[in-house]
Image: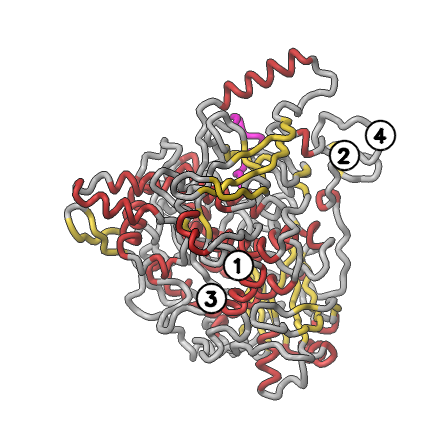
Amino acid sequence: MAAHSKPRSMVTMLFALFLFLQATTAISHASGHKHPAHRSQEGHVEESRNILEGRANNIAIVGVVGSNTVLSPRLEIRDLQKNADQWNLYLLGMERFKAKDKTDSLSYYQVAGIHGRPYVTWNNFPTPLLNVAGFCPHACVLFGTWHRPYLAIYEQALYQSVLEVIDTFPAAQQSRWKEAARTLRIPYWDWAKAPPSGQTNVPAAIRDQTVTVTKPSGQVTIANPLYSYTWGTSLPAEMGGGPYGNSPTTLRRPVSNPTRSNNNEMNTKMNALRISLRDRVYGLFMSGASWGAASTSAIGVRLSSTNSVDSFESVHDVIHNTAGGESGGHMYYLDYSSFDPIFWLHHTNIDRLLAMYQVTTPNTYMANGNIPRNMAQWNKGEPKNSNTPLKPFTKDSAGNYFTSNDVKNTAVFGYTYPETAGSPTANSIKAAVNSLYGPSSSSKKRSTPTGQYEGRPFKEGDYNTVLSIVANKMAIAGSYTVHCFIGDVNHGNSTSTATATVAAPASTGTSSAYTNSTGDSTGDYTESPNYVGSYGIFGGSQKGDEVMTEGCIPLTTALQGKEATGELKSLKPDDVESYLAKNLYYKVIGPGGVEINVSNMTDFHVYAKSCKITPPASPDDLPTLGDYVKIPAATHGKPGGAPFVYVPKPVDIYQPTPPTNEEPSTTLGTSYPTGTMVFPGPEQEQGYCVSQQTIEYVDESGKFLYSEKS
């Protein structure tokens, strides 16, 4: 995202603009290129005509754009609550949005259903689907960019519902509500930032069962639309069954008798996880990795990127696992997760972090890579790049698809974020990252609920140590989570013995605080002061083809705590390696809370590595990292901890053209003598379009100010 340069006095005019005198100039459009090499011109024209006719009347995804709107930031949910009128409209809009008929393309049911189940088409996308699967490209280079127009159509549909709500108010009140709607955008939940004093990681607004709102009739109490989504009295047959006994209502960390969410347990576990999340976000920004490498957990990208030990997608995964829970909540399963309202708050934060990261790495963007598994719109192994059509998201009624290049600037959809609004620079973003997520952030004076060490600023001679995890995303039916400890766990570590977790006391809301029985040796181990954090491998409801990913759990903050108490001599690799060999523990928990013996998994590996840290020179700069060096003794003898070298597989290697002079085969997945998977090049895909985006800025009178190209 390029920084703008404009007079401060013109900021309000620029954002009353609406900017979107957007011109997308097609340089090369290959909508009909998925065809045999010698097809006749007449055949090509006829096929193109049929494609265009079939795509007529598509939904043009524009986000929140209209004559009475301005470019506005999406706010953190707790900040949105401070504006009473906007908060009221957001809740009423969500209520109406979720109540829309399931046959409506802009209903909550249909928009949520794009991501995974019910595995049906949307927005005139060709039927039948290429594969019986959802559209979401997880563990893929398209992860970050595909979800941007997905959030935009969600925001667009919600905004339409908000306008419909305003029409129900008396005419004399509508101007007030329209003014509030003018700058209303969907909020995000910042799960890595220290919550305001007296609050917890998961805002009560997400956990409360009911909420008070103002309707035309006055103040009333309604079911909180952020608490859950209900399909009706039963799950629609096309959903193919669902978690927790086919529950017709989304659940978080569910318990039985009666079936209900345990939001307090979710909140407790998120509290214990926050420092790890903070450190992972900060670690990503100080890594300096390219945007493409930082955005995806795809191991093929990880292998070719120095110091890229984690990804925003990998951080994203553990939120899913923690919110859904091993007991089988909907967020725990890739193909059901988008129906839980928390999904959208979470993904908006991921989009925000990626937008911020774009500013700090201005000369990088999406990496090239292959599709890792069969999807609704693509086959496993197909090569993709920044000009690949982000199916099924169309930018006009003619059915032309967005590409990653089209959505590089969030202003295309009428929104920014607090950190990216105005004229952001790399330094301004780094200063914000230091304030929000640095080890000397606003949380430094506070103790955590579990007594975890909060961290300290980096100094000369410090080292950064991480526990890297390589794992198969689709190894089992469901997700699984690695829980990490440094030091004694009060009920013992369990790296090989199968145990089961114990459900925490249940609560359906926030009326009573969650307390764990500290005298019970089988209690919640995430409340141990030696708990470092967890790493989520976010999978689907069914075991699938191997999809290898890599990410990490940062260990530095916990090691700083051990150094502060004298248990660890220093943060230098030699001292850390021997200390971890004796004191590093982890357990891998799968569906049902059962521990998985990863020694039996050939596609699960754990290793530690360390690098030198150079502290930042100023508050608007970040630490820099040296080269990582493995410290193998740290995991020696532990499950999955044996030394290993990952050998790239055909699906990990971006190979857009055949390695020989042979013509590309029209049969997908043809293997050449090298063993490399070869598909038609990305430019052969129907809808592929090389484009250049220009955004023209005007003032309130329509006078041209300047333009910006992608």
Q: Amino acid at mark 4?
A: Asn
Which of the numbered marks, if any, corresponds to residue 193?
3
Which residue corresponds to mark 4?
A: 661
How far apart in space, not on screen, are marks 1 and 3 (Cα)? 16 Å
Q: Secondary structure at mark 2?
A: loop
Q: Amino acid at mark 1?
A: Val
Q: Earlier in the sequence, mark 4 or mark 1?
A: 1
In which quarter of the view is residue 438 placed? bottom right
In which quarter of the view is residue 660 placed? top right
- Judging from the image, the colouring scheme is secondary structure
Q: Secondary structure at mark 1?
A: helix
- Tell me the residue at 73%/71% (across/down): 636
- Tell me the residue at 73%/36% (across/down): 656
* Residue 491 in view: no
Discs 2/1, front: 2
| Magenta span includes 129 | yes
419 vs 99, nearest the viewer: 419
How far apart in space, not on screen, are marks 3 and 4 (Cα)? 53 Å
274 vs 190, nearest the viewer: 190
| Magenta span includes 188 | no
Q: Amino acid at mark 2?
A: Thr
Please tell me whether the stretch drawn in magenta is mainly helix, strand or loop.
Answer: loop
**Which x, y percent locates residue 284?**
61, 61
Q: Range of the magenta residues?
A: 126-136
Q: Residues within 10 Å of mark 4 (few under 14, many from 20)?
A: few
Discs 4/1, front: 4
Residues at marks 3 and 4 touching, judged by CB atoms closer than 8 Å: no
Residues at marks 3 and 2 touching, judged by CB atoms closer than 8 Å: no
Q: Secondary structure at mark 4?
A: loop
Q: Secondary structure at mark 3?
A: loop
Which of the numbered marks, if any, corresponds to residue 657?
2
